[in-house]
């Protein structure tokens, strides 16, 4: 017998989900398209952000939050159209995200360790900007965003979605272990796809975070055989999510997002070296068509000089 875990979730969790949907409706209104050059620069800065947070052992959702600040700021503000200013905005947005990002651990909120200071980013820029430049930019970003720096991001929705996955009412320890392993696989693949979506301006900036999270969940479910997750479990899960969020696999925005995630996945997997080693076995086990990480996406212009992390934890450089 299958029972929905939603019945076991307390009212606070449902209120938090509704609060996230409300914040999403108020903040997610990006319509502007970026030029090819700006998309190349954005991709590089997103790649750099993930390298920074991995290098300093920070929560990977910091990158998603930082790019949220970055995209919303570019939508509203008139910024100097040069690479150096672009890097200043991206570095400051990531710095802000690291300072304020919270992580969910065993259902409790814990602060992400603040291991990075302005001096790290200034040193990484190799003279492109100073600490005062970052301080001024931080103030300008905060004012431009009207101090709305607690947006809903896809990984937050994904974490809440899995609380409503149906469970089997059984006492068999082996069944429980298999169910936990399946859920772990599903969560890992979904979160990885969410991280990949951060690279794409359309998925990250123009589509609602709840839709991106929901779509990555659908793509992940499609990769797992029905013998592992039954059609009944899938149907009940999606029904519960529809009642709570209004999202449906048949909606145009979900179909568009799912299609883009599937097509974008194999491309970015070639570039995200910081993640592919620990995720490749999980992704291949899930049945995704994975390319060998041998080439770089054509949209990533090789002549672009962007910040990255050198082996020393106290030294970053421009390449």
Image (cartoon, rainbow, N blue to C red):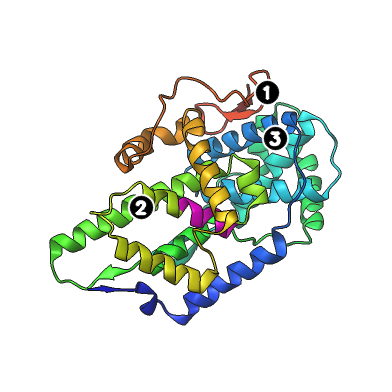
The correct choice, above or below, for 241 with respect to 271 in the image is below
Q: Locate residue 123, reporting x and y percent.
A: 67, 31
Q: Main secondary structure of the magenta part?
A: helix
The residue nearer to you, when weighing 48 against 186, is 186
- In which quadrant is the N terminus drawn? bottom left
At a point 52% along the width and 41% down the height, the residue shown is 196
Q: Locate residue 295, reporting x and y percent.
A: 50, 20
List the residue tagged with mark 2. 186
Q: CA gap, disc 3 to disc 1? A: 15 Å
Q: Is residue 97 left or right of residue 73?
A: left
Q: CA gap, disc 3 to disc 2? A: 39 Å
Quadrant of res 169: bottom left
Query: Which marked residue is nearer to the observer: mark 3 or mark 2?
Result: 2
At a point 31% along the width and 65% down the height, the residue shown is 233
List the residue tagged with mark 3. 122
Q: Is residue 165 visible?
A: yes
Q: Mark 2 and 1 residues: CB-CB less than 8 Å, in contact? A: no
The residue nearer to you, when weighing 121 against 86, is 86
The residue nearer to you, when weighing 82 against 17, is 17
Query: Which marked residue is nearer to the observer: mark 2 or mark 1?
Result: 2
The correct choice, above or below, for 87 with respect to 170 in the image is above
Q: Which residues are magenta?
A: 209-216
- Identify the element where label 1 is drawn: loop
Q: Is residue 254 magenta?
A: no
- Residue count near mark 3 (Cα–Cα under 10 Å), binned few <14, some 14–19, many ≥20: many
């Amino acid at each position: 017998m299958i029972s929905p875990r939603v019945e076991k979730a307390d009212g606070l969790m449902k209120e938090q989900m509704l609060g996230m949907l409300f914040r999403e409706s108020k903040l997610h209104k990006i319509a502007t398209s970026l030029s090819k050059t700006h998309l190349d620069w954005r991709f590089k800065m997103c790649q750099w952000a993930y390298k920074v947070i991995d290098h300093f052992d920070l929560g990977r959702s910091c990158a998603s939050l930082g790019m949220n600040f970055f995209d919303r700021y570019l939508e509203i503000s008139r910024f100097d159209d040069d690479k150096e200013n672009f890097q200043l905005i991206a570095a400051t947005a990531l710095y802000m995200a690291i300072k304020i990002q919270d992580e969910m651990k065993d259902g409790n909120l814990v602060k992400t360790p603040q291991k990075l200071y302005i001096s790290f980013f200034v040193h990484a820029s190799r003279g492109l900007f100073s600490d005062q430049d970052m301080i001024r930019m931080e103030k300008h970003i905060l004012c431009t965003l009207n101090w709305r720096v607690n947006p809903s991001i896809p990984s937050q929705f994904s974490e809440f979605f899995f609380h409503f996955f149906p469970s089997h009412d059984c006492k068999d320890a082996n069944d429980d272990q298999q169910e936990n392993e399946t859920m772990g696989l599903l969560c890992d693949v979904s979160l990885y796809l969410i991280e990949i979506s951060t690279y794409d301006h359309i998925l990250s900036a123009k589509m609602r975070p709840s839709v991106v999270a929901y779509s990555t969940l659908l793509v992940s479910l499609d990769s797992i055989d029905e013998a592992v997750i039954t059609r009944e479990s899938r149907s009940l899960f999606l029904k519960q999510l529809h009642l709570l969020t209004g999202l449906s696999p048949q909606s145009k925005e979900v179909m568009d997002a799912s299609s883009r995630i599937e097509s974008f996945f194999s491309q970015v997997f070639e570039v995200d070296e910081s993640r592919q080693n620990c995720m490749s076995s999980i992704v291949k086990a899930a049945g995704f068509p994975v390319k060998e990480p041998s080439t770089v996406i054509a949209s990533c212009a090789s002549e672009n000089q962007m910040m990255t992390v050198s082996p020393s934890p106290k030294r970053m450089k421009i390449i």
